[in-house]
Image: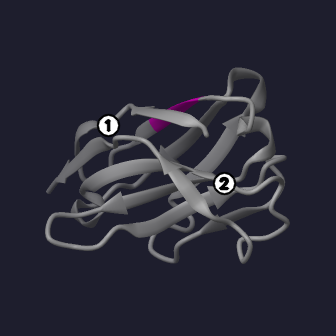
Amino acid sequence: QAQLVESGGGLVQAGGSLRLTCAASGRTFRNSAMGWFRQAPGKERKFVAAVAWNGGNKWYADTVRGRFIISRDNAKSTIYLQMDNLTPEDTAIYFCAADQKYRSRSMWDVDFGSWGQGTQVTVTS
């Protein structure tokens, strides 16, 4: 039910940083786990990071752990992805996603059924 709009992508040199923003609408946002996914050219969409509905637990793909931080501000109906120490392997379209279930208790239960249109991140060497 949530509508999602990503922003903050762009062109950056290796070692640089970007912060992605996902603005959400709909009554379900504050009770939904949220996530970030990315899709590189010619590859499948892959999981990047997720945060529980209450902002407590967070999960990261091994490829980004220690470099990326996911956070949410329920008062602003917004989630963020702070990306540091970027490499060319991070080049992809980044998508925001919302869990369709009410207050999922773990990542094993989530159903990311709502998606934004994506924002392009390009990292040069």
Residue closest to the eye, 38 or 64: 38
- Residue visible at 26% across and 56% down? 92
How far across and down, in percent of the image, does residue 65 sit?
55, 68
- Residue visible at 50% across and 59% down? 67
In the visual, does 74 lie left or right of 61? Answer: right
How far across and down, in percent of the image, does residue 79 sit?
61, 38
Calculate the distance from the C-alpha at mark 2 to the C-alpha at mark 1.
Answer: 25 Å
Q: Can residue 83 be seen in this view?
A: no
Relative vertical location of residue 17 with respect to residue 89 in this rendering, above or below: above
Would you say the magenta stretch is mainly helix, strand or loop? Answer: strand
User: Dot 2 surroundings within 10 Å: few (below 14), some, or many (20 or more)?
Assistant: many
In the visual, does 19 lie left or right of 56? Answer: left
How far across and down, in percent of the image, does residue 100 sit?
66, 54
Q: Which mark is residue 100?
A: 2
**Residue span colored magenta:** 20-24
The residue that mark 1 highlights is 9
Q: In which quarter of the image is residue 110?
A: bottom right
Circle 2: residue type: Gln
Position of the C terminus by quadrant: bottom left
> Per the image, is 54 magenta?
no
- Residue visible at 21% across and 48% down? 122
Relative vertical location of residue 80 with respect to residue 63 in this rendering, above or below: above
Q: Provide the secondary structure element on which disc 1 rests.
A: loop
In the visual, does 95 lie left or right of 112? Answer: left
Q: Provide the secondary structure element on which disc 2 rests.
A: loop
Q: Which mark is residue 91?
A: none
Q: Can residue 114 be seen in this view?
A: yes
Farthest residue in the top direction?
76
Q: Which of marks 2 and 1 is nearer the N terminus?
A: 1
- Residue visible at 74% across and 48% down? 32
